[in-house]
Image: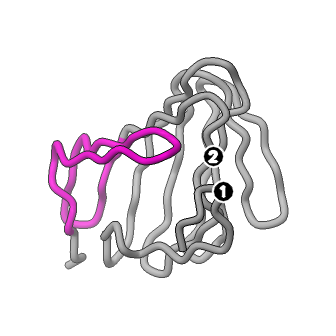
């Protein structure tokens, strides 16, 4: 059984926007993530989970290892466990996406950052 430390309704404000937990289960977490215009999440990877992102509103620029993908609403991308990734909002409106995490340990501390424009380590 997976270790899930998120709770439904949990949320946090970040320099790039905010996230909110919509649901959790034995081995999954569903988040709604909003990224402000010109906001960019850190280049990061996770040791214990994969993620699947579905763009809901706005435009997204996704870095996945060595690839860059420009995504519109309705597009989706799978982030394999251990892959370097980030998402940015290059548009003038807020961008929102739904993230489904799956893995044996689902915890906000499972983040290894390689680059962050906000100076977080």
Along the line of sight, the residue nearer the viewer: 1 or 61:
61
> Which label is found at residue 117?
1
Q: Is residue 50 left or right of residue 58?
A: left
Q: Residue at x 61, y 22 (%)?
A: 58
Query: x%, y% of residue 66?
Result: 84, 64
Question: In the image, is residue 116 part of the stretch drawn in magenta?
Answer: no
Q: Which residue is mark 2?
A: 40
Q: Residue at x 61, y 23 (%)?
A: 73
Dot 2 crowding, Cα within 10 Å, few <14, some 14–19, many 20+? many
Q: Which residues are magenta?
A: 5-31
Along the line of sight, the residue nearer the viewer: 17 or 82:
17
Q: Answer yes or no: do the residues labelled 1 and 2 have beta carbons within 8 Å? A: yes
Query: x%, y% of residue 115?
Result: 68, 68
Image quadrant in which the C terminus is located? bottom right
Q: Is residue 74 above or below residue 54?
A: above
Q: Is residue 75 left or right of residue 21?
A: right
Kindly report the distance in space between the C-alpha atoms of the residues bearing marks 1 and 2.
8 Å
């Amino acid at each position: 059984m997976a270790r899930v430390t998120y709770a439904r309704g949990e949320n946090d404000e970040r320099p790039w926007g905010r996230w909110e937990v919509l649901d959790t289960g034995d081995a999954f977490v569903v988040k709604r993530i909003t990224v402000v215009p010109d906001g960019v999440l850190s280049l990061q990877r996770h040791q214990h989970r994969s993620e699947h992102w579905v763009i809901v509103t706005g435009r997204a620029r996704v870095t996945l290892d060595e690839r860059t993908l420009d995504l519109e609403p309705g597009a989706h991308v799978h982030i394999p466990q251990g892959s370097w990734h980030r998402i940015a909002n290059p548009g003038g409106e807020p961008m929102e996406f739904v993230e489904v995490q799956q893995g044996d340990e689902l915890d906000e501390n499972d983040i290894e950052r390689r680059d962050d424009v906000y100076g977080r380590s």
